[in-house]
Amino acid sequence: MSVAVTRLASGLTVVTDAMPQLETASLGVWTGAGGRSEEAGEHGLAHLLEHMAFKGTRRRDARRIAEEIEAVGGDLNAATSAEQTAYYARVLRQDVGLGLDILADILTDSVFDEAELAREKNVILQEIGAVEDTPDDLVFDLLSETAFPDQPLGRRILGTPETVTAFDRAAIGRYLDTHYRAPRMVVAAAGAVEHERLAEDAARLFASLPQDPGPAAPPARYVGGETVVETDHEQANVLIGFEGLSYRHADSHALGVFTSILGGGMSSRLFQEVREKRGLCYSIYAFQWGYADTGLFGVSAGASAEDLHELVPVVLDEIAALAAAPGEAELKRAKAQMKAGLLMALESSSVRAEQLARHILVWGRPLTTEEIIGRIDAVTAEDVKRVGRALLASSPSLAAIGPVAGLPRREAIMARLAG
């Protein structure tokens, strides 16, 4: 087996998947802290820290960080989500050590220069503005806020102009010290990597990390509700959501199959009924977001104002029909799509490294591909019906932006599902 795991004395986990046929490696550092780890006055701080990590250390200024990695043809990037933050690099075989050294440097020795902080705040303010100007992105923020109101999981990852502007070096340092701790962090790599050498380097480079896990994120509470914003855009962007499942839930793969059958591709029920048969929209699909203790399931659609009155009832009817009677052929098709998608994605070293890191953070061990495929294959029609009924029993969430005067509102959605 090519996967190797080392748990260092500090609590930091190093996990690799050697792909000897490759000449490149993807490596990164993941921490089990993101937007939902923030206190009330820290909204957007996890994302700001991600930006500031690249803006200079005691050994390297921001320009040198960029030049060193690009001098060997590599690249650096990072991402913040609700529950995790990742910093990663892609390099050639011989430059894995350099990539890890830079990642360790920015995570353990950043200086958070005041001038760089001021500039980066302005960059994030522009990023926030870009989302506000993009309704098909903004509507997803509105859905999270509606489903999980007044709690960290429902807040926007980017923060607000007011909170971002208020942060200083001390706030960034406190968040870093509180949440970037060895037992909650993973060094993961895939491709042209040598596990023992990477583990030795990680033990040395991350030796300064605190060794106790720190505080856990507060539990989430799904509520549901309605947020509708009328604008003069040409198209309405509509999301209908329900409480989903945690990625740790025994039925998480059954919900994945339900999602795929309903709106996972061109053969899905929603695509065929809403787009192909009725021509009510260009884009329609279903999605599920799993978290540590809850989840969010939804359907996304973009349609013209005059089609909304027909679109929403059709979507609701398709959800209810699938929860009542999934077909055997579509069950097999959805499973095949999920397994093929998994296997195709894992041909990428960067996807493989990310998967390994997430497995360690979620389950404490890497799951084998065979184990995941076995869980998908085990899903039955009864399982799909059960998760469908559970979705419909939860309180719906509605988020919409655009010419939505004719949009059926949440009360109408609840009445339709009850009938």
Image (cartoon, rainbow, N blue to C red):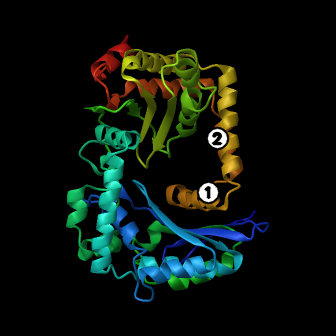
- Mark 2 vs mark 1, CA separation in Å: 20 Å
Which residue is under mark 2? Answer: 375
**Rendering quarter of residue 351:** bottom right
Q: Secondary structure at mark 2?
A: helix
Reading the image, the residue beneath label 1 is 351
Q: Is residue 220 left or right of residue 211?
A: left
Q: Is residue 226 above or below residue 60?
A: above
User: Alpha-carbon neighbours of circle 1 within 10 Å: few (<14), some, or many (≥20)?
Assistant: some
Residue at disc 1, secondary structure: helix
Q: Give the mark nearer the N terminus: 2 vs 1.
A: 1
Res. 397 visible in picture: yes
Q: Quadrant of the C terminus?
A: top left
The residue at the far right in this view is 21
Number of other residues with Cα within 10 Å of mark 2, as a class: few under 14, some 14 to 19, many 20 or more: some
State which mark lies toward you, 2 or 1: 1
Residue 16 x %, y % = 65, 68
Q: Identify which residue is drawn at 43% across, 47% down.
A: 291
Give the percent coordinates (x, y) of residue 187.
55, 70
**Quarter holding residue 238:** top left
> Which one is nearer the viewer's eye here, 51 or 83?
51
Mark 1: amino acid? Val
Return the residue found at the far bottom. 59
Q: Quadrant of residue 125?
A: bottom left
Residue 219 shows in the view: no
Q: Please report the residue visible at 75 percent of the width from the left and 67 percent of the height from the top.
A: 22
Q: Residue at x 40, y 67 (%)?
A: 50
Three-letter amino acid code at disc 2? Arg
- Spot occupied by residue 404 in the image (x, y as percentages of width and height): 31, 25
Q: Position of residue 386 (x, y in %)?
A: 51, 26
Residue 406 has which mark? none
Residue nearest the observer in this picture, 87 or 32: 87
